[in-house]
Image: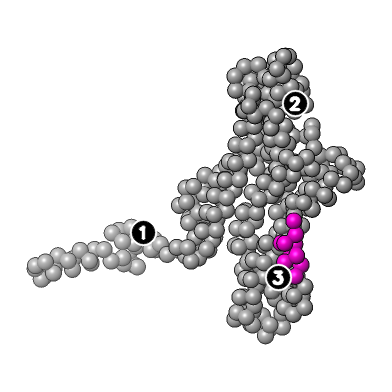
Amino acid sequence: MVSGPGASLSEESTHDVADPAEGGVNGTTGKAKAIEGRSLRQIAWRRFKRDKVAMAGGVFVGFLVLVAIFATPIVSLIGHPIDAFNNDLIDPTLGLPIGSFGGISGEHWLGVEPTSGRDVFSRIIFGAQTSIIVAFLAATVSTIMGAILGLAAGFLGGWVDTTVSRIMDFLLAFPQLLFSIALVSVLPDSFFGLDGRVSRMAVLIGVIGFFGWPYIGRIVRGQVLSLREREFIEASRSLGARTGRILFRELLPNLAAPILVYTTLIIPTNIITEASLSFLGVGIEAPNPSWGGMLYDAKSYYQSDPMYMVIPGVCIFITVLAFNLFGDGLRDALDPKAH
């Protein structure tokens, strides 16, 4: 037996080596745990979790979506009917809420409206529902149109690319807000059997979604131009794959990340657009609640009852900020060059 430092090291190493006939390392049984690889989705999730600011934005976005979905039961449990007038809470001389901070109390968490006395909390909840539905569905319309037309323009080229590109240039230069005001103003309050709120939301979704697709269309077109000459596309062509399969089975999955990121970033823009149209009086009309409409009503009371303006303004600000933070974090997590 050899003595010295080398011998002790040799003995220690002998004890640490796993014997397949006896079991694992140091008497343990079973095979050594294999090293598992991570998918791109797992890598992106790990990156996203490290961004605490983006995580906070994502949590708030999820909370807001739940509020929009369950607006009716929330208001029925802890709020008041959105059109219930509470004249006993209004000063008959000034027409302002009785009490400080716009009449905030344990019964009315965010106070009441001047003159009418309607519960602000309930109207904020239903205003969130309006903004989320319009923003999400308009973003869906923009994403679908932009992805399909951008794919076609970038992959087919020729006159298709020229036509789609000129349409995108025209729409990007078109005064969207002015056209939206003109279009929404001339449309009836109800059509196809839909009531005023639903029909007006449908119009806003169509107008905002239609004018939003050129932005994502340009992004998709640029990505397709860089991907259509890649090896996997040439391999699909050589195997006889049709154009539809190449577009939707080969190219589109590789564009999922930028499309998803842009969709999350266009939603806050849609929220601001809906609020702007409602503020100008051509969006969601009274008495239906809307954050932009509440801001319009509050402009006459910003000195005597500033809370009536502050509350919907803060809601718009926090919502847009949360979506932007969430979108930025998602973009960094899905970008393979970010880390």
Label 2 close to label 3 by CB (< 8 Å): no
- Give the residue at x 63% y 27%: 303
Instruction: State whether residue 175 is above or below residue 77.
Output: below
Q: Nearer the viewer, mark 2 or mark 1?
A: 2
- In the rendered structure, which disc, 2 or 1, sits on the residue that comes first in sequence? 1
Q: Earlier in the sequence, mark 1 or mark 3?
A: 1
Q: Position of residue 158 (x, y in %)?
A: 74, 80
Q: Secondary structure at mark 1?
A: loop
**Label 1 belongs to which residue?**
29
Numbered badge on residue 81: 2
Residue 110 image point, x, y percent = 63, 26
Q: Residue at x 71, y 57 (%)?
A: 212
Colour scheme: one colour
Q: Examine the structure image and report whether residue 256 is included in the region drawn in magenta.
A: no
Local secondary structure at mark 2: loop
Q: Which residues are magenta?
A: 165-175
Quadrant showing the C terminus: bottom left
- Give how far across and how far down residue 272 sits, in percent: 67, 46
Q: Nearer the viewer, residue 32 or 80?
A: 80
Vertical order, 268 against 13 (above or below): above
In the image, residue 124 sits, relative to residue 332, either above or below, namely above
Circle 3 sits on which residue?
151
Q: Quadrant of residue 101?
A: top right
Q: Any magenta on residue 172?
A: yes
Residue 203: horizontal and vertical position, in percent? 81, 48
Residue 204 in sight here? yes
Which amino acid, mark 2?
A: Pro
Q: Between 251 and 202, which is closer to the camera in this rendering?
A: 202
The label shown at residue 56 is none
Secondary structure predominantly adopted by residues drawn in magenta = helix
